[in-house]
Each structure stands twice: as C-alpha cells, then as structure tokens.
C-alpha cells in the first residue's frame, strides 16, 4: 500500500471520529465530506460503530450514513452495468441483491450456476431434440436441485434476491426463469426471457424453431398459439414483445418493479420509494 493510500485511510479515520463532534456544524460538514467519498468509507464507519459503545444517537447516524452510501453504490453499479451493455445478467441480479445484502460475493452466485452446469452438461448431448434438452434441464432444475415456485409467499422480498432464491430453492416466475436461463446460457442453449404481462416465461429460439417454457409450471413447453390465447384472456392487444426475447435490462427492471410491490405489501414505503429511485436511474 502506498503512503498516499495510508494517508487517505488515516484522514478517513480522523473524519469518522469527528462525526459526533459537539459542534454541530463540524459534525454536519464531516458527514457531507464522508458522503462525497462514497462506499469506500463504509468499513471505517462500521469499525467506528462497533468500537463506539452505547451511543444510540451516533449509532443511528452511522447506520443511516452506511445505508445511504450502500444505496448510492447500488445505483452507481447498475448505471455502470447498463452503460457497459448489460451483457452479464448475473451481475445485474447480484447488484439488485446487494441492496439488501451489501457484502454478497458475486463469485458465490457464479458457483451455484457452475454446480448446476456440470450436472446438466453430463446429461446433455448435441444431437438431442430441443424438447429433450428441456426435459434434461427440467430434471436437473426441478428434481435434482428441487426448485419450487414460491406460491405461499409470492410477494416476498426474498423472491427478488438471487442469493435467497439459491438458498431457499423457491422463487417467483422471473427469479426462477433467471436461474434456469443462466444455466441454459452456460450450456450454450438459445434460451432467453420473454416479458409477458403478469407472467415471465422463457423462449427457446433458433432460425428453425421457437417454442416457450413456463418455469413457474415446472418447465411446461407450449407454443405461440398458447401465448395468443393467454393475451386474449388478458384482454390485451398483441405486441411483438409478448412473443420475442427481452433484454437483460428489461429483466432487471422487472425485478426492481416486483421489489417495489414486495416492499409496499409489507408497508415498507421508504424502501419501496428507494427502489423506485433505483429503477428510475436505469430507465
């Protein structure tokens, strides 16, 4: 570590200790300065919080400051992800999950996919019919790894947090589709998400063939006609987007919209408003 970095660390530590200065103007200036330094100051704030003893006012101030810095980091990361072409869906989902789990390691999420990939790779053959490939994926996903639709707690916040879905083996349509699709992409299969109203599904699409997969219904395969019937039942005007692959940005935006609803359902309006701001930042 260079002497400049050491100096910066000691400066940050000194600033943090001034957060509870008796002069309110000094304390406010220090807080403003720490906010401009961003997420890098969070470890120093956490150290100060732990070593501070029973000072509830200061601890509340540090808690609020850490939360705000983490929230801003989520927005910065998502904007960067969007700017860079939003190619890595797992990264986008990881950033969303860091809103609730700021210390979450993306490599831990990648490992889950790698484990599933190896199991599926052993079973798949290149000469398989696409429907048979889906049967193999369904067997791995639903029988070996026992993923289930979270019908009892459909609006749970955990359904939008990929680490929670991996751990609990339960999710909503979009989070289950994301894991299934990440596995399929890792295997080189042409499977993408489709943004249907009120239901997120997948499509297997090549120049020769296209069909659809309902992950929330144990990987049921269905056709374009079935989607047309669904659109009629919903009394909606058909749109090309109801039949074709959507982007990773579309997927992450929909996850954020689900998250807003989840927080509203438990009357956590402050967090619902924050996620709304995150969504606006990338829209």
Image (spheres, rainbow, N blue to C red):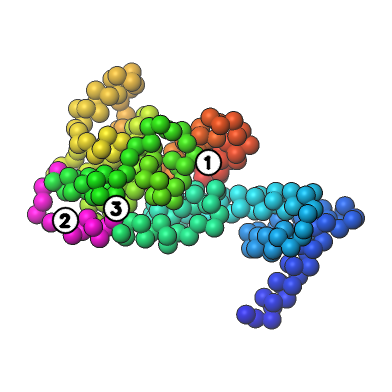
User: N-terminal of the two: label 2 or label 3?
Assistant: 2
Q: Position of residue 130 (x, y in %)?
A: 15, 46
Would you name the residue on which mark 1 appears? 279
User: Residues under labels 2 and 1: Cα distance?
Assistant: 39 Å
Q: Which residue appears at 62% of the width and 80% of the height?
A: 1
Residue under label 2: 123
- The first of marks 2 and 1 along the sequence is 2
**Residue toward you, 24 or 145:** 145
Q: Residues within 10 Å of mark 3 (few under 14, many from 20)?
A: many
Q: Position of residue 75 (x, y in %)?
A: 56, 50
Q: Quadrant of residue 119?
A: bottom left
Kindly identify which numbered label has been placed on residue 186: none
Q: What's the magenta region?
A: 116-131
Q: Which residue position is annotated with label 3? A: 183
Above or below, 136 relative to 261: below
Secondary element at tag 3: helix
The answer to whether residue 123 is magenta is yes
């Amino acid at each position: 570590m260079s002497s400049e970095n050491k100096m910066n660390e000691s400066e940050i530590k000194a600033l943090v200790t001034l957060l509870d200065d008796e002069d309110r103007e000094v304390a406010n200036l220090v807080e403003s300065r720490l906010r401009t330094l961003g997420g890098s100051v969070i470890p120093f704030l956490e150290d100060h919080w732990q070593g501070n003893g029973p000072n509830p006012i200061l601890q509340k101030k540090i808690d609020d400051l850490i939360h705000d810095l983490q929230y801003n980091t989520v927005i910065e990361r998502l904007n960067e992800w969007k700017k860079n072409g939003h190619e890595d869906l797992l990264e986008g989902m990881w950033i969303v999950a860091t809103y609730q789990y700021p210390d979450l390691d993306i490599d831990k999420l990648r490992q889950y996919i790698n484990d599933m990939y190896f199991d599926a790779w052993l079973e798949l053959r290149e000469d398989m019919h696409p429907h048979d490939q889906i049967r193999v994926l369904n067997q791995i996903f639903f029988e070996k790894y026992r993923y289930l639709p979270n019908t009892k707690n459909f609006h749970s916040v955990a359904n939008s947090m990929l680490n929670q879905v991996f751990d609990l083996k339960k999710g909503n349509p979009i989070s289950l589709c994301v894991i299934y699709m990440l596995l399929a992409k890792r295997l080189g299969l042409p499977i993408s998400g489709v943004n249907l109203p009120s239901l997120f599904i997948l499509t297997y699409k090549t120049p020769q063939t296209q069909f659809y997969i309902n992950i929330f219904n144990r990987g049921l395969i269905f056709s374009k006609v079935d989607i047309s019937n669904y659109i009629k039942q919903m009394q909606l005007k058909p749109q090309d987007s109801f039949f074709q692959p959507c982007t990773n940005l579309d997927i992450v935006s929909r996850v954020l919209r689900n998250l807003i609803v989840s927080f509203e359902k438990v009357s956590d309006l402050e967090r619902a408003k924050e996620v709304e701001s995150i969504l606006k930042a990338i829209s």
